[in-house]
Image: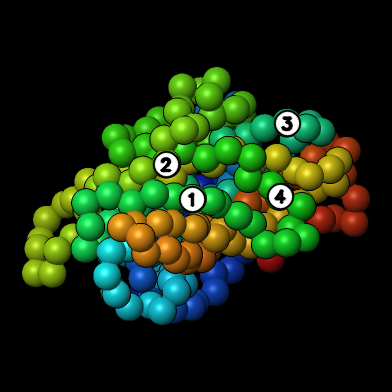
Amino acid sequence: MLTVVATTTDRGLRRPKRICTSDHEAVMGRDPAWRWTVLLVALSTAVSGCTAAGPQVRPGAEDASRVESGVIDVAPGEHNSIGTVTLCTENTGAGEITAVTTPPGSGVEVVAYSVANEPSDIGGLRGRLESLGADTTSHTVERKCRAEGETGAIQVATLLIEVVAQDDRSARADHLTIHWEADGNTGEFDVQWAILLCTTVDQESKDFCQQHLED
C-alpha cells in the first residue's frame, strides 16, 4: 500500500515512478517565504547493484520516498538550498560523498553540498548553504545504517544541496545522483528527488512550471 503525504502552495504534484530496492526517509522543514511544493510517496531508490557489497554509503532509512521540490519566483542566478536524502554507511565507520550531480541537460546545477550528521533546520530556504550556516566542506557520512535484525530508530545524516538554474529558463532535474567513497570502494546511486526551479523570467512560458507541477 502506498502512503502519500503532500505539501503544496497552490499547485499539484508529479506522479511517482517505481524503480529498484534501497530505501530512505525524507523529513523536511518549510520557510513560509520560500514557495515550494513537496511530494512524498513510498518508492524504492536506485542503487548501483541494489545489494550490499563491502563498505558503502547508501540511503539512510527503510521507507523510501519519491520527492519533488518545486521553487517558484526564482530570480536569475538565485541560489536555493534544500535538505534532501538521508544517508548512512554500511560495513564501515565513515564514507565520503564525492559529488552530487543532476542529469545532463536538466538545466539544474548543484553548486555546493554538505553532509549534516546532526539534525538540520534546512528544509527549503532561499540563499547559499554557507550563508545559512552549513559547512560546505563537510562531506563525510558518520552515521551507520541499521544492522541486520536491529529495531528502533537510528540517527542518519542528511544531504544538503545548493542549486541554481543554469540560465534564465525554468528547469527541472528528475533525480539526483550521489557519488561516494568508503574505505577505497567507490560507487553511486540515484535518488528520485526531483528539483524544479521556475524562474521569474520564464515561469509562464509554454506552461512549463504548471505542466510539471500538475502532471
Label 3 crowd (10 A; few <14 / some 14-19 / many >=20): some
Give the mark nearer the N terminus: 2 vs 1: 1
Point out the frontmost of discs 4 and 1. 1
Q: Amino acid at mark 4?
A: Val
Q: Determine the CA span between mark 4 and mark 2.
A: 21 Å
- Residue 80, position in %: x, y? 63, 34
Q: Determine the CA span between mark 4 and mark 1.
A: 18 Å
Q: Amino acid at mark 3?
A: Glu
Q: Determine the CA span between mark 2 and mark 3.
A: 23 Å
Q: Which of 122/109 is in front? A: 109
Screen quadrant of the C terminus? bottom right
Q: Are marks 2 and 1 in contact (CB under 8 Å)?
A: yes
Q: Amino acid at mark 1?
A: Thr
Identify the secondary structure beneath mark 4.
strand
Q: Are marks 3 and 4 in contact (CB under 8 Å)?
A: no
Q: Which of 6/38 is in front? A: 38
At x 33%, y 46%, the residue is: 141
Q: Name the side, left or right, on which 12 lies relative to 146.
A: right
Circle 2 residue: 139
Circle 3 residue: 78
Circle 1 residue: 98
Point out the frontmost of discs 2 and 3. 2
Q: Amino acid at mark 2?
A: His
Give the mark nearer the N terminus: 1 vs 3: 3
Circle 4 residue: 108
Q: Name the side, left or right, on which 64 lies relative to 11.
A: left
At x 18%, y 60%, the residue is: 146
Give the mark nearer the N terminus: 4 vs 1: 1
How does the figure colour the protein chain or chains?
Answer: rainbow
